[in-house]
């Protein structure tokens, strides 16, 4: 592991740099979610709506363990700065996109960089702070995620309404440049030269498995790609058992705590990204809301989450981890059922905000207890990979989940003859933009009804994911709390 020079590293400045980087990464998803209906109205390609998110998350997910290993080999700072440069390059290119295909490609580049921002930032915190200080810093960075999540939808709506959707990507640039500049001067590290073997075969197999699965569920040669994904996944597991330094050590996932935590992260990640991605589309496409109002539909999630997280942290010494995980997952499941029923009958903007708030509260209660339980259950040398696995599986769930939900929505939209005959995807793009007022009332009602039906089916998928999370939470093991110094 890279050793840190505590005497020379400027810790306050380094923390500021990391906060800027994390704020940028956390805000990205909600800002783009708010802007996407307007992007579709401008670029078209409504049937590929979900791929703008899937490409970003797929690239990010695959790169998390790879960039983490490179940070061990070459130091945190150079890999962090390289990740930031790639992220900003993808951001600028996304803002310049003139087709949906180009936007999807540029979002994948952006995702490659994003894969290094959060895990390496958390690793740097672990390097420059002791155990007790790290616990306090988790609260600081948790607050950053909450503020970014709240600001993202509102900022995205304002940017789209006053400037252009392209600026939701350009807004990353000043944050990134400032963060990189401060980090370049504030963080000092000396890298210990050790023999390492980067698990490229495992990384390649995992990447191919996830890509094949996502393409398969999107309808591209599903009878070939889905079984192929399974075969590649099996090969990945075999390789991970044989290499000296596996990207994801299999022995960790044989424990009950890591197995249940990984399942929880996958299910809740899929439900969370589904809600963040599709609620703004309902608000703008069905209710005719503005981009700012569409962003406000998911903003309350970022209010409920940090509040519940803070409460959960205070309750852990009294209740332990497992009760809070169970309570949180029940609340998450309740929120998905509420959203499914309200959207099926025609939810109002207020009802969307209520459902989003409840979901955030559930995630806040469960996630804090889940992550700390995982960290407590492993040794110090395993804490990094165990913590990273929580984010890895959440991203995997979100990537695959939003892809499946996108397929369901696209099929529902194209099932109606009125929609097909009136222009199909082009018509959908029109009702999401300023031209909505020019669409004939009967056609507008028909396409809005199709969109509502498709999004109702999407939320019922989230209900199923919530049910899986509840069952898994009841299997979550009891973990003894250890002293902070452990």
Image (spheres, rainbow, N blue to C red):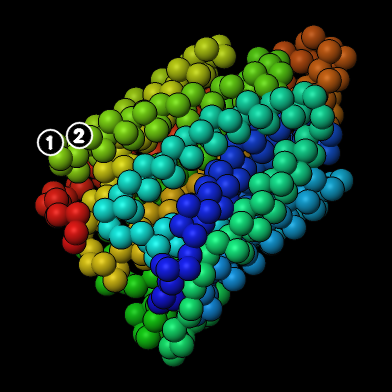
Task: Give the residue at mark 2.
Answer: 315
Look at the picture and state if 435 lies above or below 372.
above
Towards the viewer: 32 or 216: 32
Say whether residue 414 is left or right of residue 53: right
Give the SS element for disc 1: helix
Residue displayed at 47% across by 35% down:
146
- Quadrant where the N terminus lies? bottom left
Residue nearest the observer in this picture, 130 or 395 = 130
The residue under the point 44% across, 50% down is 394
User: Going 83% across and 48% down the picture, which residue do you hit?
Assistant: 97
Q: In the image, is residue 189 above or below residue 136?
A: below
**Left or right for 420, reference 231:** right
Residue 260 is at least partly visible in this image: no
Residue 224 in picture, x, y percent from top left = 59, 65
Q: Report, in whole angstroms, how far the alpha carbon at label 1 lies from the one at label 2.
A: 5 Å
Residue 264 screen position, x and y as percent? 33, 47
Please give the label number shown on residue 171.
none
Q: Which residue is mark 1?
A: 318
Q: Can residue 442 be spotted in the picture?
A: yes
Give the quarter of the figure containing the C terminus: bottom left
SS for tag 2? helix
The residue positioned 40% from the left and 32% from the top of the image is 305
Mark 2 Cα shell of 10 Å, populated few (<14), some (14-19), many (≥20): some
Res. 333 image quadrant: top left
Q: Residue furthest front?
A: 7
**82 horizontally vs 353: left or right:** right
The answer to whether the residues at label 1 and label 2 have Cβ atoms under 8 Å apart is: yes
């Amino acid at each position: 592991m890279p050793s840190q020079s505590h005497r020379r590293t400027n810790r306050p400045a380094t923390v500021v740099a990391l906060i800027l980087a994390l704020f940028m990464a956390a805000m990205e998803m909600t800002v783009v979610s708010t802007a996407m209906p307007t992007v579709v109205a401008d670029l078209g390609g409504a049937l590929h709506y979900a791929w703008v998110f899937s490409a970003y998350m797929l690239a990010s997910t695959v790169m998390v363990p790879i960039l983490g290993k490179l940070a061990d080999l070459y130091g945190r700072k150079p890999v962090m700065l390289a990740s930031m440069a790639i992220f900003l390059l993808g951001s600028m290119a996304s803002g310049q996109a003139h087709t949906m295909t180009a936007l999807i490609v540029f979002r994948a580049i952006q995702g490659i960089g994003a894969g290094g921002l959060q895990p390496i930032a958390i690793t740097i915190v672990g390097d420059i702070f002791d155990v007790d200080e790290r616990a306090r810093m988790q609260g600081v960075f948790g607050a950053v995620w909450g503020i970014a999540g709240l600001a993202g939808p509102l900022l995205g709506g304002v940017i789209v309404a006053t400037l252009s959707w392209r600026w939701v990507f350009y807004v990353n640039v000043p944050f990134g440049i400032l963060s990189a500049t401060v980090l370049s001067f504030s963080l000092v590290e000396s890298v210990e030269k050790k023999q390492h073997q980067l698990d490229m075969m495992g990384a390649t197999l995992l990447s191919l498995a996830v890509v094949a699965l996502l393409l398969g569920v999107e309808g591209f040669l599903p009878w070939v790609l889905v079984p192929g994904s399974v075969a590649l996944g099996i090969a990945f597991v075999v390789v991970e058992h044989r290499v000296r330094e596996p990207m994801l050590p299999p022995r960790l996932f044989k424990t009950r705590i890591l197995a249940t935590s990984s399942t929880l992260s996958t299910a809740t990640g899929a439900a969370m990204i589904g809600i963040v991605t599709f609620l703004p589309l309902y608000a703008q496409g069905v209710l005719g809301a503005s981009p700012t109002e569409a962003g406000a539909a998911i903003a309350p999630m970022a209010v409920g989450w940090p509040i519940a997280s803070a409460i959960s942290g205070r309750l852990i010494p009294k209740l332990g981890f497992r009760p809070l995980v169970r309570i949180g997952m029940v609340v998450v499941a309740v929120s998905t059922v509420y959203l499914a029923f309200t959207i099926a009958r025609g939810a109002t903007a207020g009802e969307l905000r209520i459902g989003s708030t409840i979901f955030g509260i559930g995630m806040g209660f469960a996630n804090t207890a889940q992550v700390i339980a995982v960290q407590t259950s492993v040794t110090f040398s395993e804490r990094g990979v165990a913590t990273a696995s929580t984010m890895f599986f959440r991203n995997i769930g979100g990537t695959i989940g939003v892809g499946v939900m996108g397929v369901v929505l696209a099929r529902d939209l194209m099932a109606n003859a009125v929609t097909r005959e009136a222009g199909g995807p082009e018509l959908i793009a029109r009702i999401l933009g300023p031209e909505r007022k020019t669409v004939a009332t009967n056609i507008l009602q028909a396409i809005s009804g199709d969109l509502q039906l498709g999004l109702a089916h999407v939320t019922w998928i989230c209900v199923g994911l919530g049910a899986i999370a509840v069952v898994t939470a009841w299997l979550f093991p009891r973990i003894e709390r250890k002293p902070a110094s452990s």
